[in-house]
Image: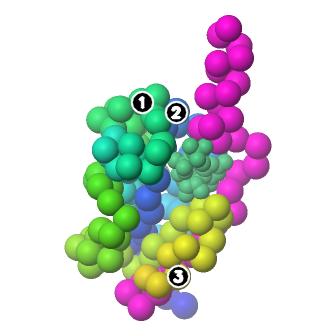
């Protein structure tokens, strides 16, 4: 297989943590450019996901990450096909919690799921922070 050039991934990336860093590091190593669709606050509200950090700052943190080349807002579930075409992505990749969910995109590019980093998540960090602050 030839090395894919442009990798596309999506996520909320709230309370940016080492699980996020390791996923982005592994994705960046798969290609030449890593492009990240960061869920907007409106889209998270639609998904029932409450974020601590607003989109503007989650995107800023992602842009500051050395593994990330470009960040754009994810507004809905349906935009992925258009984004793959727009960003000329060779690979669409997500963490293993999404295994199988996006296999229908395989007609446009390679679809890959990477194992999650164990024992860390935004949900877990929020829980830990709230019990420590109380
Ligand atoms: N991710 C990962 N390892 C973790 C946590 C997240 O590889 N321990 C990956 C997810 O699989 C996803 C991306 O990071 O591809 C963004 O995940 P996101 O949902 O923003 O992070 P979580 O920590 O899983 O957040 P939450 O607890 O709110 O679901």
Magenta extent:
106-134
Q: Decide if residue 80 is in sight here.
A: yes
Point out residue 19 in the picture as x, y percentages from the top left corner: 63, 46
N-terminal of the pair, mark 2 or mark 1, is 2
Q: Residue at x 62, y 37 (%)?
A: 123
Say which quadrant the N terminus sits in: bottom right
Q: What separation in Å lies between label 2 and label 3 (alpha carbons)? A: 28 Å
Give the residue at mark 3.
103
Q: Which secondary structure, mark 2?
A: loop
Looking at the image, which is closer to me, 102 or 112?
Answer: 102
What is the tally of numbered marks visible in this picture?
3
- Tell me if residue 65 comes above or below residue 52 in the rendering: below
The residue most toward the top is 134
Q: How did the renderer colour the structure?
A: rainbow
Residue 94 drawn at (x, y percent): 54, 64
Q: CA distance from mark 2 to mark 1?
A: 7 Å
Q: Are marks 2 and 3 in contact (CB under 8 Å)?
A: no
Q: Are marks 2 and 1 in contact (CB under 8 Å)?
A: yes
Q: Mark 3 or mark 1, which has the lower sequence index?
A: 1
The residue at which mark 1 appears reads as 53
**Residue lying at 71% horizontally and 17% vertically, measured from the top left:** 131
């Amino acid at each position: 297989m030839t090395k894919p050039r442009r990798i596309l991934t999506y996520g909320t990336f709230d309370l940016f943590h080492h699980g996020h860093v390791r996923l982005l590091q592994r994705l960046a190593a798969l290609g030449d450019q890593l492009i990240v669709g960061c869920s907007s606050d409106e889209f998270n509200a639609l998904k029932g996901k409450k974020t601590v950090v607003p989109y503007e700052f989650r995107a800023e943190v992602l842009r500051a990450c050395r593994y990330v080349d470009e960040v754009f807002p994810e507004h809905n579930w349906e935009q992925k096909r258009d984004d793959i075409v727009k960003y000329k992505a060779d690979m669409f990749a997500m963490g293993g919690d999404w295994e199988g969910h996006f296999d229908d995109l395989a007609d446009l590019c390679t679809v890959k799921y990477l194992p999650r980093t164990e024992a860390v998540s935004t949900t877990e960090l929020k829980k830990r922070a709230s019990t420590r602050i109380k």
